[in-house]
Image (spheres, rainbow, N blue to C red):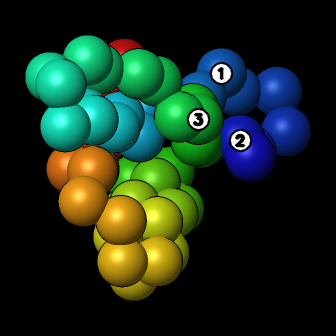
């Protein structure tokens, strides 16, 4: 997830149809977080995914 010795700096968030927000995963790089969010969105669910800095 993160590079050796450094804490995760990016979070992938999900919001469901009821407006509830959940932290999906913390990632070491923005690129890793963006890739995960894109993968989750590609599954075709109606949830909203986004990436934010920790």
Residue nearer the viewer, 4 or 34: 34
Name which residue lies at 42% across and 32% down.
Answer: 11
Residue that extends furthest to the right in the rendered view of this protein? 4
**Mark 1 and mark 2 in contact (Cβ < 8 Å)?**
yes
Coordinates of residue 35 in the picture (x, y in percent): 46, 71
Coordinates of residue 7 in the picture (x, y in percent): 65, 21
Mark 1 residue element: loop
Residue nearer the viewer, 44 or 25: 44
The Cα atoms of the two marked residues, 3 and 1, are separated by: 13 Å
Quarter in which the C terminus is drawn: top left
The Cα atoms of the two marked residues, 2 and 3, are separated by: 11 Å
Name which residue lies at 19% across and 37% down.
Answer: 17
Question: Badge 2 is on which residue?
Answer: 2
Question: Badge 3 is on which residue?
Answer: 25
Coordinates of residue 8 in the picture (x, y in percent): 59, 28
Q: Which of marks 3 and 1 is in front?
A: 3
The quadrant holding residue 13 is top left
Mark 2 residue element: loop
User: Visible in this render: residue 17?
Assistant: yes
Dot placed on the residue nearer the N-terminal end, 3 or 1? 1
Q: How crowded is mark 2: few (under 14 residues within 10 Å), some or many (20 or more)?
A: some
Tag on residue 7?
Answer: 1
Left or right placement of residue 30 versus residue 47 in this view:
right
């Amino acid at each position: 997830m993160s590079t050796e010795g450094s804490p995760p700096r990016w979070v992938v968030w999900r919001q469901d149809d009821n407006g509830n927000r959940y932290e999906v995963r913390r990632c070491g790089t923005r690129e890793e977080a963006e890739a995960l969010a894109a993968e989750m969105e590609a599954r075709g669910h109606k949830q909203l995914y986004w990436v934010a800095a920790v």
